[in-house]
Image (cartoon, grey):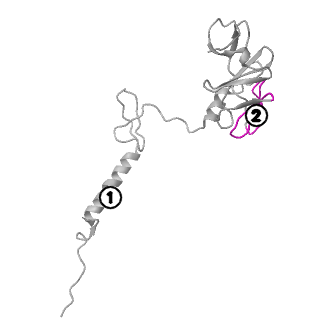
Amino acid sequence: MTIEDQTTPSDVVTCGGATRRHALAGLAVAAGALCAACSSSSSKGASGAPSTSQPGAGSGTSMSSPPASSGSSSDTAASSSGSTSGSASGSSSSSGSAGSGGTALAPVSAVPVGGGKILADQGIVLTQPSAGTIKAFSAVCTHQGCSVATIEKSLITCPCHGSQFKIADGSVANGPATQALAPKQVKVENGQILLVS
């Protein structure tokens, strides 16, 4: 009696109900689709502007502008503020020569002398280091982009890592922040603090 070969041809072996050939063909198609999805094209979108397909964006989806930089918001705030932390910037004048107008922020009476007021909705900190001197700064901490939360003992404090800034000029009093709060231009008219555009 002879023993018959009990092996089966490779195209009969199944993998989840499909033959090996079908499984390998499916993998080849999937690999090709993945390569196509990861590549970029320089075709023009509907607006006529160059567009680049992004991985994971789905087929037919294009972006008409390059993706945002990977820098943190504090990097953006720091680069836009530069080194404009001089004591004259952000100050106000009661007889604005820039003409009337501006966005009303708060009455002067709402900002305590030797302290300040945080306008969270506008992202602005108003301070009054001495009577009649109004200063304004961005409420975004230059360390990692958190919003400052309190003003006590002439210091503006960020709750995230404890950075503190002076109310007189927004400069760093205690780190880890290394750059001053970005100044905002304000003026006072008829007892109102106005943000100058």
Q: Which residue is mark 2?
A: 164
**Closer-to-camera residue (95/109):** 109
Q: Residue furthest bottom?
A: 1
State yes or no: residue 172 in magenta. yes
Name which of mark 2 and mark 1 comes first in the sequence: 1
On the image, the x and y values in percent for residue 132 come to: 78, 13
Residue drawn at 67 percent across, 28 percent down: 139
Specify whether residue 89 is in view.
no
Asked which secondary structure carries label 2, the reply is strand
Instruction: Count residues near mark 2 (Cα–Cα under 10 Å), then give few for <14, some for 14-19, many for 20+.
Output: many
On the image, the x and y values in percent for residue 169 come to: 77, 24
On the image, the x and y values in percent for residue 129 come to: 80, 21
Q: Residue furthest front?
A: 110
Res. 53 image quadrant: top left
Res. 137 image quadrant: top right
Q: Amino acid at mark 1?
A: Leu
On the image, the x and y values in percent for residue 5 come to: 22, 83
Q: Which residue is mark 1?
A: 27
